[in-house]
Amino acid sequence: TFIHNVVNGHSSATDCILSPISVTHTHTHTHTHTQRERNVITVTPWLAPVVWEETFDKTLIDAIYKMQNITVATTVFALGKYVQFLKDFLESAERHYLQGYRVHYYIFTDQPEAIPMVTLGANRNLTTLKIPGSSRWQEITLRRMEKLEKLIDTQMINEVDYIFSLDVDTKFYGHWGAETLGDIVAVIHPGYYSTPRDEFPYERRPESQAYIPQGMGDYYYGGAVIGGLVEEVHKLAKTCRMQLDVDKANSIEAAWQEESHLNKYFLYNKPSKILSPEYLWQDFKSKTDDIKIIRFSQVIKNYAEVRPNP
Ligand code: UDP
Ligand code: MN
């Protein structure tokens, strides 16, 4: 990946098409050599910004989006034992997520009674949508695209402007603001941001609709964060749902279920904005030098304990 090349301070002929723009800053801590360079890519070869701390002006961005009086729908799935993650997710979102904006949470769950009482701020709402549970976790993640598509069809087009679909086994730790908004937004998966392209866990079997051949692909995007304008996210969800249906009819399940289909979608429909791994970290990973702030992170979970099947 481009990030990989620049992080390691070298580039390979096949991967590095453009030189990166590096973010340099001076810091004043007493213990260091005054300047440190963070070599991360801040714009993709198709000219989409990659959002990192110090690449945006929060005040200016708020001035733009506050004027538009936007509503951001936020969908999360909490089925089976995953309802236990809702409390931390919602409480931390109320501290850090799109503060000052109109946010409407939509929670898909099989146990509406288990949704915790969390006090929401002004202009923030929560709707519970009851759906059946499942005895296979793969089934649950596969169904997210279909549910997202239907939800947008039935109640969103005229009600909300932007939408984020987020994993629930997560927590916010830092500012997540309007700098994340864009036509169609992807996040770089924290587990693969320094992995060479050919080692990305894309679906490699041509029989699957999610197939990506070796040598292709830009980044490995995480399925835990999808965002954008409602109509763009609808197009994404519908396309992935149809591809998932074809795979199902052919009895093939992509390596990482919907995440594989998402990566295929973004290969041919480039994201207009990319969120750096600051916007999707993993609690078990220690912070690297490139990460100035962890804003949102996947909590540590005991898979055997929380998932309905191995
Ligand atoms: N999920 C759920 N119940 C389950 C399994 C998954 O509600 O039994 C939902 C939940 O929103 C979760 C998302 O599907 O955040 C993705 O699954 P998971 O977090 O297990 O995948 P991972 O992030 O570990 O790849
Ligand atoms: Mn998760």
Image (cartoon, rainbow, N blue to C red):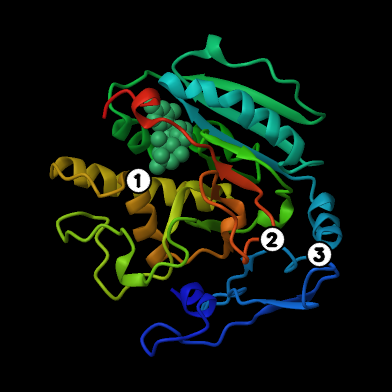
Give whichever of 270, 43 is nearer the camera.
43
Give whichever of 149, 34 is nearer the camera.
34
Q: Mark 3 points at which residue?
A: 57
Instruction: State whether residue 173 is above or below residue 49.
Output: above
Q: What element carries label 2?
A: loop
Which quadrant of the figure contains the N terminus? bottom left
Kindly identify the amino acid type of the residue bearing the numbered disc 2: Lys
Q: Which of disc 3 and disc 2 is earlier in sequence?
A: 3
In this view of the protein, can residue 145 be seen by the observer? yes
Residue 150 x, y percent position in the rendering: 44, 34
- The answer to whether the beta carbon of the residue marked 2 is less than 8 Å from any atom of ligand 2 is no
Q: Which of disc 1 and disc 2 is earlier in sequence?
A: 1
Q: Mark 2 points at which residue?
A: 292
The CA distance from mark 3 to mark 1 is 33 Å
Q: Residue at x 81, y 64 (%)?
A: 57
Residue 63 falls left or right of residue 72:
right
Kindly identify the amino acid type of the residue bearing the numbered disc 3: Asp
Nearer to us: label 2 or label 1: 2
Instruction: State whether residue 98 is above or below residue 275.
Output: above
Give whichever of 61, 229 is nearer the camera.
61
Q: Which residue is drawn at 75% across and 25% down?
A: 120
Number of marks drawn: 3
Residue 114 x, y percent position in the rendering: 54, 12
| Neighbour tally class for label 1: few under 14, some 14-19, many 20 plus, Cα within 10 Å | many
Kindly identify the amino acid type of the residue bearing the numbered disc 1: Glu
